Amino acid sequence: MLCVTQEQNGTIKVANPQPADTSTCGLVVLSGAEALAVHEPFRMSTADAATLAVAMIGLVAVGWVSRQLIRFLTTL
């Protein structure tokens, strides 16, 4: 991680020396590996995956029920 600041003219300047606490930085630049480690989309626990699967199945079920209700109401 690099702590950087943006100058008035738009250029980016790397802080030298790098602070130990990056929460004080204006901008933090991550390398590709660091970004993947923090924001990997498929890194989740089994419980999180089960919750996601139940939500997806529930969404499909709501769509199916809605379609059946619309089909029923149009036949009246």
Image (tube, grey):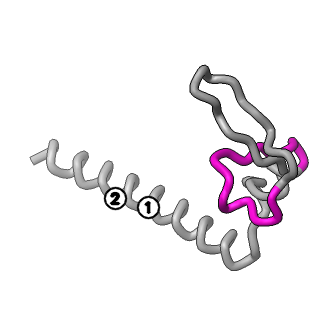
Instruction: Look at the image and say whether residue 30 sits in the magenta stretch.
Output: yes
Decide if residue 75 is on the left or right side of residue 60.
left
Cα distance between the residues tagged 2 and 1: 6 Å
Which residue was labeled with disc 1? 61
The kind of residue on which mark 1 rests is: Ala
Residue 37's x, y, as percent?
84, 57
- The image quadrant that residue 10 belongs to is top right
Q: Is residue 42 left or right of residue 66?
A: right
Mark 1 crowd level (few <14, some 14–19, many ≥20, 10 Å Cα): few
User: Viewer-proximal residue, 74 or 45?
Assistant: 45
Name the residue that disc number 2 marks. 65
- Rendering coords of residue 8 (x, y %): 57, 26
Q: Amino acid at mark 2?
A: Val
Vertical order, 14 against 64 (above or below)? above
Residue 30 on image: x %, y %: 81, 46
For the magenta stretch, what is the residue range?
19-33
